[in-house]
Amino acid sequence: LSLETSAESIESFLELCKSEGEIDMKSPSMSNSTTFIFSKFKNSRFTILHPVRNPDMHPSEALFFDLDNVKVADMVVFTVSVPANASNRGLFDDEGLNTLTAIRAQGCPDCCFVYLHCPVQQGLRGRQEALSYIKGHCGLPSAKTLCSDRGEQVLRTLSDARPAASGVSWRAGRSFMVAAQCEGPGEGSVRLQGHLRGRPLCVHSLVHVLGVGVARIVSVQQVGGPGKLVADPARQDSLQMAAQPDSLQGEQTWPSEAEMAPEPRQVNRGMSDYQADWFADDIDEEEGEGEGEE
């Protein structure tokens, strides 16, 4: 993720990955990710999720895409460019600071900051100033800070990193998937492809698709895997969300629209709604007095 309006730092980081490794052409093809193979490192295979950007995208829409990527990431790499006057202006722009704040609120996994294009004339002093700014503004005490001038060291650090055992607590509560591709094979059905995280997903359970509603799973298949798991309709959860009330047992449910509809009333001709309300109150009072006299 870039903490600047310009995406040059992201492109520079991808070029760094290409210079130290090669793209895995056998990996599943997804529009928002690229898999690299680094033969010289212990963990030699990385899948990098790309931020989704287009010229017409609103900043808030881009932020939601970034938050979705962070949900399924094992590690977040923030990229920043070090300008020639790093001491005179901040490395993060307003949009970058908003992104950091939202990610911290959602829950951030292990992360590191990679700063690029550090001017040679600044040397060690410029790097120290950039490091001090990042540590003071990121709000993530455990984050690592790396310099892209040492490309092999950056990728080796990422290779040796292990996700924290505790991680983000809410991830363990349920299964969730961020879809990268969506296809509609037939009426009333949809095929989603993406990254699955959280608890193990049961093929017989129900899923909630944003903007669609609750649905049943037909099958689950790992991309490039040998086979797929097909759901058994007899073992699947019911789509009925509310229990049917038993009137013989005195059970009740929410009133229907017909029961909640106001009763029709007779209004004299030429009387406004305001006058009709007073007229109805007068009738109720007269009926109450009449019942009391009896």
Image (cartoon, rainbow, N blue to C red):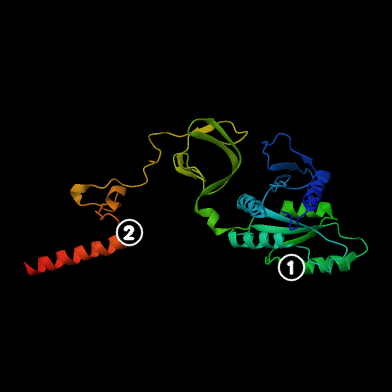
Quarter occupied by residue 77:
bottom right
- Helix, strand or loop status at disc 1: helix
How dense is the environment of label 1, judged by Cα within 10 Å: few (below 14), some, or many (20 and up)? some
Tell me the residue at 82%/55% (across/down).
148
x and y percentages locating residue 29 in the rendered image: 68, 36
Q: Earlier in the sequence, mark 2 or mark 1?
A: 1
- Whether pointer 2 and pointer 1 mark residues with C-beta atoms closer than 8 Å, the reply is no
Q: Which mark is residue 50?
A: none
Relative placement, left or right, of 199 versus 132 is: left
Which residue corresponds to mark 2?
A: 273
Alpha carbon distance from label 2 to label 1: 65 Å
Vertical relation: 8 (above or below) 283: above
x and y percentages locating residue 28 in the rendered image: 66, 36
Relative placement, left or right, of 134 versus 237 is: right
x and y percentages locating residue 58 in the rendered image: 66, 52
Which residue corresponds to mark 1?
A: 135
The kind of residue tagged 1 is Lys
x and y percentages locating residue 81 in the rendered image: 81, 58
The kind of residue tagged 2 is Asp
- Numbered disc in front, either 2 or 1: 2
Quarter occupied by residue 169:
bottom right
Q: Which residue appears farthest toward the top when viewing the image?
A: 186
Tell which of 227 and 134 is nearer to you. Answer: 134
